[in-house]
Image (tube, rainbow, N blue to C red):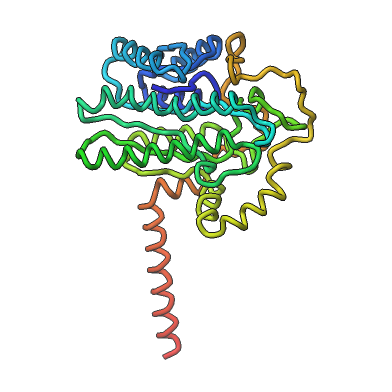
Amino acid sequence: MVTGASAGLGRAIAVQFAKQGANVVLLARGLEGLAAAERDVKAAGGNAFAVPIDIADPAAVEAAAEAAEQRFGPVDVWVNNAMVTVFSPVKDMQADEYKRATEVTYLGCVYGTLAALKRMLPRNRGAIVQVGSALAYRSIPLQSAYCAAKHAIVGFTDSLRCELLHDKSNVRITVVHMPALNTAQFGWVRNRLPHKAQPVPPIFAPEVGARAVYWAAHHNRRELFVGGSTVKAIFGNKVAPGLLDRYLARYGFESQQTGQPESPLRPDNLWSPLDAQQDWGAHGNFDNQSRNHSCQLWVDLHPSVLAAVAGGVAALAGAFLICSKNLVL
């Protein structure tokens, strides 16, 4: 089960699972995007079942979960990825915009988790993956609605994790914190800034995040950080949050905007999907700036290799010192 599966990271996640022959249920609002995602999943070697829903509707989420199990059997993995947001200073935000962003990005995650738990707990197995963000720990200006929702997901998940441990449940839950990704959201997000929105560099291809989600679904990891920039943001905020406040106050506005002026009349996807009539795909407009690989993530997922290399270096260093000592003697 992948929410927000019609485009962007959700689309890439669906394809990543399909490459392993998975049965993938695609949940999203946009009909054309869902149809294209279905084709991508099948082309990658998986089976697809598209269910058009608004993730902010808990009854629709529950109905989709029931339909999915009738189609493919028990749900093994549920990925909560759907999101909407608004790029805007807080002073210009509207109350209904905060409500909508919270209902989709945070409560949509809660509703998906509840539907997954309803099915996984009686079977005592399954994995729930929450798509988090570096911004779940280190908020930035102009994205208050998104940052708040991602913070809430971490709080909700931490509480649930304690309960699962208390109950000695075999249901696993993890959060994968993403860096800036080259997805379609920057072309359809509601944007009140003078220039077009962009991800804050360094930018990664959505497939990097998708591979991390697939790995997290099959390993017992509390949290997984994707990209060195995510690690630096989260741990930097632990060490010097005030310094980061001042840094972002100075550089955080310009770094989220391109040099192209934004049109105030451009449609957005806050209330209605923009992929209802067209397919936006997994990638946004920043392919020439995005990275297809993260060295930090590779090292994090292969600690035994790193330990072996470190051991080899230590052995060589020891041998060198012994030889040097013998030569001196």
Residue visible at 59% across and 21% down in the picture: 270
Q: How many marks?
A: 0
Q: Nearer the viewer, residue 74 or 267?
A: 267
Report the residue that reaches farthest toward the bottom.
329
Left or right: 222 in relation to 145: left
122 or 110, which lies in front?
110
- Relative to 65, does residue 240 appear above or below in the rendering? below
Q: Position of residue 282 (x, y in %)?
A: 56, 24
Residue 252: which quarter of the image?
top right
User: What residue do we see at 68% from left, 35% from top?
Assistant: 91
The relative height of residue 159 versus residue 18 in the rendered view (above or below) is: below
Q: Quadrant of the C terminus?
A: bottom left
At 42% from the left and 28% from the top, the residue drawn is 109
Who is closer to the viewer here, 307 or 100?
100
Point out residue 301 in the picture as x, y percentages from the top left corner. 40, 45
Horizontal side of residue 19 vs 84, given as left or right:
left
